[in-house]
Image (cartoon, helix red, strand yellow):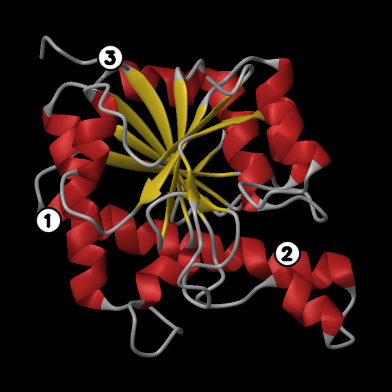
Amino acid sequence: MSGLKFKRVMLKLSGEALAGSETGFGIDPATLVVLASEVAEAHALGAECAVVIGGGNIFRGLKGSGQGMDRATADYMGMLATVINGLALQDTLERLKVPTRVLSALEIRQVAEPYIRRRAVRHLEKGRVVIFAAGTGNPFFSTDTAAALRSMEIGAELLCKATKVEGVYDKDPAKHDDAVMYRRLSFDRCLSERIGVMDSTAITLCRENKLPIRVFALLKRGNIKRVLLGEDVGTLVNDKGE
């Protein structure tokens, strides 16, 4: 479709978003349909869409390690949670007639293809939505870092961080009525001021490879489409903060 500003994009989704607003745990079917519909709309525009999804709605490695569990074991459990979410998203997308592949950094051949960079790129070129599961396949790395890394590997033009709020704020907007949303931020400012866009490893990867990050509200209908068409949605993080 003409008018697309970004042809190939990476969408980073939090696992918590799949739980909906009521329970904060598990997968809410209605929320999953809304999310999948947004991805399907982006796919219908002709964009090549990749997705990295977290697992915090099922199990979070950092929380497990904070409760005394071995950190590596907890992180592997978190990776498996992302596979569950990836399969759920795949099923919903395919019911919307969107061709989809799940590629896992952990080898689970019965349910997902093993991650191979060239295979992922080929799937995108064939018009399939590619869902990257199991993070980087290594403990001690977040799914934010996985999203940044996979973005570089597939040649994404933009990393979209979809969140529960409109963008990046100077303080938690759920707790502070006077919270102000940033429209533009530089990578350096995010790192120096520890602004919670993504973790520092992911931000550094994006800075070194000049990959812009767009942060916006996940469940606001039409937002992914607006981003792909170049509209100024949410917060833009780039080299210069302009």
Q: Residues within 10 Å of mark 1 (few under 14, many from 20)?
A: few
Q: At label 3, which amino acid type do we have?
A: Lys
Q: Kindly identify which residue carries mark 3.
A: 5
Query: In 3D space, how far apart are the residues under numbered discs 2 and 3 (Cα atoms)?
Result: 37 Å
Q: At label 1, which amino acid type do we have?
A: Arg
Point 68% across, 29% down: residue: 187
Q: Is residue 4 above or below residue 219?
A: above
Point 90% across, 86% down: residue: 68
Point 60% across, 62% down: residue: 171
Q: Residues within 10 Å of mark 3 (few under 14, many from 20)?
A: some
Query: In 3D space, how far apart are the residues under numbered discs 1 and 3 (Cα atoms)?
Result: 28 Å
Q: Is residue 230 above or below residue 221?
A: above
Of labels 2 and 1, earlier in sequence is 2
Q: Quadrant of residue 121?
A: top left
Q: Quadrant of residue 152?
A: top right
Numbered label attached to residue 95: 1
Q: Kindly identify which residue carries mark 2.
A: 76
Instruction: Please say if the residues under marks 1 and 3 sit with CB atoms less than 8 Å apart.
Output: no
Q: Left or right of 218: which side holds 184?
A: right
Q: At label 2, which amino acid type do we have?
A: Tyr
Query: In terms of depth relative to the viewer, which is nearer, 97 or 47?
Result: 47
Q: Left or right of 75: which side holds 168?
A: left
